[in-house]
Image: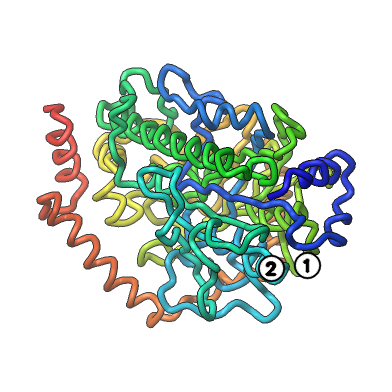
Amino acid sequence: MPARKKPILSRWLKLGVFALALQLHAEDRPNIIWIISDDLSPDLGCYGEQLDAVATPHLDQLATEGVRYTHMFGTSSVCSPNRSAFNTGRYQTSIGAHHHRTLVKKPLPDGVLTIPERFQRAGYFITNGRPEHDASEPMVRKGKLDWNFSVSGEPFDGTDWSQRDPGQPFFAQVNISEAHRPWTRDMERPVDPSKVDLPPYYPDHPIVRIDWALYLEEVQRFDRKVGQILNRLVAEGLAESTIVFVFGDNGRSFPRDKGYLYDGGIRVPLIVRWPDGSRAGEVDDRMISMIDLGPTALDLAGLAIPDNLHGRSFLAGRGAGRTAVFSAKDRTGVVRDRIRSVRTRDYKYIRNYVHGVPYLPTNEYTLLVEPTVAVMLEHPLATDSPFNRNIRPVEELYALGDDPFELHNLADSPDHADVLISMRARLEEWVEISGDQGVIHEEPEAIEPYRVWLDEYLTGIAQRMGVQDRSSAVMFSYWMNKYDLN
């Protein structure tokens, strides 16, 4: 794009005159890229992860050139509900997209459009691509979608911004599979399991340390691909006209993280870089939700933010951020579930609508592919966290300042009775106002196709692993043998 666009973009950002964009032609608007990692928590050097354990130089550099957001939370802790939400700007529970991997999909409610379609209607070329091993090349493969709703036709114009018309602005989603299981060793920089710092809700066992080290190696591989994409923008002369977002679609793929509403499952990194260097090196501690990503992108492009969106722009000068974020977990796999949470700066309240059932294993998939699950089942950690007991309670309350790992449930504490009542009421109000559809049971015919697919998928995994019995004891022995720990 012509060099003259840099001063225009700078003027929007420094003066906050975003309405100016409405008067510009489409080709004068900034490009926007969402670089999305699968299953990534803020385990990066710039977020304080041990530098001797993990190396993320490209993301760390990006943080010095842009804004690092420290309190970004998903509306779910698994990919398809969360992606359905941040790609529409509405809670997945309000649009019937709350069950993970719905195979019998319904269209969006009237008046609800995807964020990409809103950009498309404004003249943007919209893309969704997945880079190969070398992310510096144009993408030819379609990226991960995982929307729990149907759309007519192709939801994107292409897989890469190189396919657009000359001068046409683009809104690109670049979906990178790291750090989704199964993991691939990082032969360039192996992580030493003895140097990793495990969360206190995991047993300090060799299997867990190896598992965590392999996850950090995936994070390093993601970092390199981000670096290749950023270098490509420079090489193509697009860095000065493109706003870059980097974030995870949900938390890391470990028990008690992905698939749960503790911070390990819903808290994700977010780094945003403006091309003129605005706010370079800033750390933004406001609480924001991932449903705010779409409205913020629309705001940056000077496009109207519809009134029916639950998300809102978090650009500088747009307010003090949220006082609370809300998250939901429904069916994952084939097991019916319903969990809701509200998180403020100081407290997390979790309501388990399906209670009195075990936390682990979440499903056969996690038992087959997550070694830490087998360790936790065979060698449970002795803490007073309800997660480590046989059943989960109706309510959970955590004081995050004193208990950032959410280990000590205060729901029965007389000293926190007022907080419990307040947080419970706040969640109930959100459930009512947002139109939470979680109370509606999913039709059996909607679950059965997924059940059939999952059975075939898990059978294939078990056969490749040479596993007949999928019990925790057998899987524990399998991982001990695989990692030569006997």
Q: Nearer the viewer, residue 458 or 344?
A: 458
Dot placed on the residue nearer the N-terminal end, 1 or 2:
2
Identify the element where label 1 is drawn.
loop
- Total numbered labels: 2
Where is residue 272, by image quadrant? Answer: top right
The reply, left or right, for residue 121 in relation to residue 450 is right
Relative image position of residue 391 (x, y in whole percent) = 40, 50
Q: Is residue 408 visible?
A: no
Contact between marks 1 and 2 (CB within 8 A): the answer is yes
| Residue plotted at (59% across, 67% down) | 93
Identify the residue at image location x=78%, y=45%: 4
Q: Amino acid at mark 1?
A: Pro
Residue 131 location (% of width, % of height):
42, 50
Label 1: which residue?
Answer: 306
Q: Residue 118: give its label.
A: 2
Q: Residues within 10 Å of mark 1 (few under 14, many from 20)?
A: some
